[in-house]
């Protein structure tokens, strides 16, 4: 009787240790004691009657009763009249020591959260998502819940091909799209596809500054990551040499916010065609442009050389873990081979729900509502800086969900400034971690103005400005101009 399953309403695996001096009673005591200690039986859980437990485990009722009485005496269980036997409240273990949070630790924090990387989660379209889920569950055939094509549900790939063509100027078809479990998964697939296509792990170039986790991921996968500087026109293309691909954010460079100029776009595509390399376009927040129509995707210029990457993390919510790639025809064979072994799939229900939102126009309506909301927030941030922080300078505000605030000489250095803000419960990011050589970065903070809930944004902005004023000179020189700043 090594392993038994008790079937008393709650499934619990009970491992009875017998032999070597352990009788059935001692074995049951040990099994239940271990379940309580490990948390498999949580405080307040009601146990079955001794009769039911004895029947399910094939033990004598007296043996079970004696074991339960012993655990009540030890404080693991408690017995109350007409309530049966329950797991007693257990002492709370002291918190384990953890390493200090890294730049990659985005959520959660207490206080004012003005870090970049997340939309206003309170704006999640709950009503529309629920209606679409209800429609999917009522209309989807049973076969929809079986094993699906590894590149994603055809319903979503069809909807995305139409939406991306209409809204972002992407030239693609459903057969060229693969649905991914977030952008990191998409980047991992790109690395695997490039390696399979080229037969070796070539170098990938990244903008400098950039999100530092992405070059780290590429290097972890065996590729070499290079950094190339960014100026006011975006990536400086002339620094590219024999890389197999370059990862860019042309619509709204992250984090500086500049747009890749038309001349640089032509230069970048020319480089890719001349060398046979690929361009990975990270269109992370391309839908949110405020002063004119959104800039079309670079992919539309060269569908044969550009891998387009999009995500729902900024338009809807990062917790959905929904992203997509649109690949050139030349990489499809490698994609099919790579996805044969990829298990990072997305829930088919979520895929069908998103397809429904796209088809009904609900996604467009949601994006328009968010665009208006974030533009108001950006304007309030700009007004506050102009009026109350005249020696600071905002950049990257034409689009997106964040801005960079360049600080004047005489302000605290970055670490002291962030510590000062954190001491007042205000959380923003310094610009230095985004640079390959942080010591050469300008003095600036990255402000995510989309993150707070609507009702909290005004007070969050006031708190930020008040805290910054305490550490900035009352008078002084304007920030010096810098690349992309």
Image (tube, grey):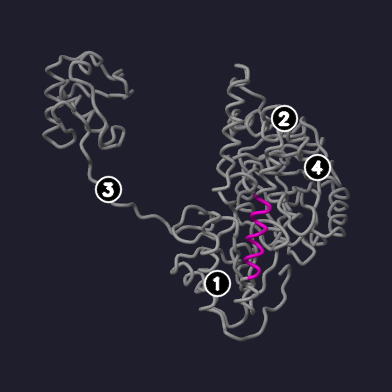
Q: Which residue is mark 2?
A: 336
Q: Which residue is mark 1?
A: 465
Secondary structure found at label 3 = loop
Comes first in the chain, label 1 or label 3: 3
Comes first in the chain, label 4 or label 3: 3
Q: Which residue is mark 3?
A: 93
Question: Most prominent secondary structure in the magenta stretch?
Answer: helix
Secondary structure found at label 4 = loop
Disc 1 crowd rating (10 Å Cα; few below 14, some 14-19, many 20+) is some
Q: Which-is-in-front pick, marks 4 and 2?
A: 4
Q: Which residues are magenta?
A: 370-383
Q: Which residue is mark 4?
A: 170
| Residue 4 in view here | no
Mark 2 vs mark 1, CA separation in Å: 51 Å
Which residue is rendered at x = 73% and y = 70% of the image? Answer: 483
Which residue is rendered at x = 61% and y = 66% of the image? Answer: 431
Disc 4 crowd rating (10 Å Cα; few below 14, some 14-19, many 20+) is many
Residue 415 lies left or right of residue 1; in this view the side is: right
Q: Which-is-in-front pick, marks 4 and 1?
A: 1
Residue 92, image x and y in percent?
Answer: 26, 47
Secondary structure found at label 1 = helix
Residue 291, image x and y in percent?
Answer: 76, 59
Comes first in the chain, label 2 or label 1: 2
């Amino acid at each position: 009787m090594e392993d038994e399953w008790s079937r008393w309403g709650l499934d619990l695996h009970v491992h009875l240790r017998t032999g070597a001096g352990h009788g059935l009673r001692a074995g049951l005591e040990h099994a239940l004691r271990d379940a309580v200690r490990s948390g498999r039986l949580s405080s307040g859980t009601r146990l079955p009657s001794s009769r039911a437990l004895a029947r399910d485990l094939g033990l004598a009722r007296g043996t079970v009763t004696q074991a339960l009485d012993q655990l009540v005496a030890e404080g693991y269980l408690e017995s109350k009249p007409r309530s049966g036997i329950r797991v007693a409240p257990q002492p709370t273990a002291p918190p384990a020591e953890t390493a200090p949070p890294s730049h990659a630790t985005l959520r959660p924090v207490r206080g004012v959260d003005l870090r970049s990387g997340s939309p206003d989660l309170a704006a999640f379209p709950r009503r529309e998502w629920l209606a679409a889920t209800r429609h999917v569950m009522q209309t989807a055939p049973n076969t929809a819940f079986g094993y699906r094509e590894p590149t994603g549900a055809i319903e979503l790939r069809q909807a995305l091909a139409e939406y991306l063509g209409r809204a972002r100027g992407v030239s693609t078809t459903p057969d060229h799209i693969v649905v991914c479990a977030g952008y990191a998964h998409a980047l991992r697939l790109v690395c695997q596809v490039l390696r399979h296509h080229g037969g070796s792990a070539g170098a990938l170039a990244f903008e400098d500054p950039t999100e530092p986790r992405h070059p780290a991921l590429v290097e972890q996968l065996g590729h070499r990551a290079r950094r190339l500087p960014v100026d006011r026109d975006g990536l400086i293309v002339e620094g590219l040499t024999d890389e197999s691909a370059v990862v860019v954010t042309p619509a709204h460079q992250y984090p500086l916010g500049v747009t890749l100029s038309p001349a640089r776009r032509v230069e970048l595509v020319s480089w890719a065609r001349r060398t046979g390399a690929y361009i990975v376009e990270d269109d992370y927040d391309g839908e949110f442009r405020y002063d004119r129509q959104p800039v079309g995707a670079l992919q539309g210029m060269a569908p044969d050389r550009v891998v387009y990457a999009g995500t729902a993390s900024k338009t809807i919510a990062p917790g959905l873990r929904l992203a997509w790639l649109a690949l050139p025809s030349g990489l499809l064979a490698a994609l099919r081979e790579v996805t044969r072994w990829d298990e990072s799939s997305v829930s088919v229900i979520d895929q069908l729900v998103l397809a429904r939102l796209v088809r009904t126009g609900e996604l467009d309506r949601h994006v328009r509502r968010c665009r208006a909301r974030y533009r108001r927030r950006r304007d309030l941030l700009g007004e506050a800086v102009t009026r109350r922080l005249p020696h600071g300078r905002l950049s990257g505000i034409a689009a997106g969900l964040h801005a960079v605030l360049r600080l004047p000489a005489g302000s605290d250095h970055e670490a002291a400034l962030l510590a000062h803000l954190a001491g007042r419960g205000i959380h923003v990011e310094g610009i230095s971690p985004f640079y390959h050589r942080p010591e050469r970065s300008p003095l600036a903070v990255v402000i995510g103005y989309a993150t707070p809930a609507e009702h909290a944004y005004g007070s969050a902005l006031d708190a930020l400005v008040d805290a910054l004023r305490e550490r900035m000179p009352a008078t002084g020189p304007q920030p010096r101009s810098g690349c992309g700043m």
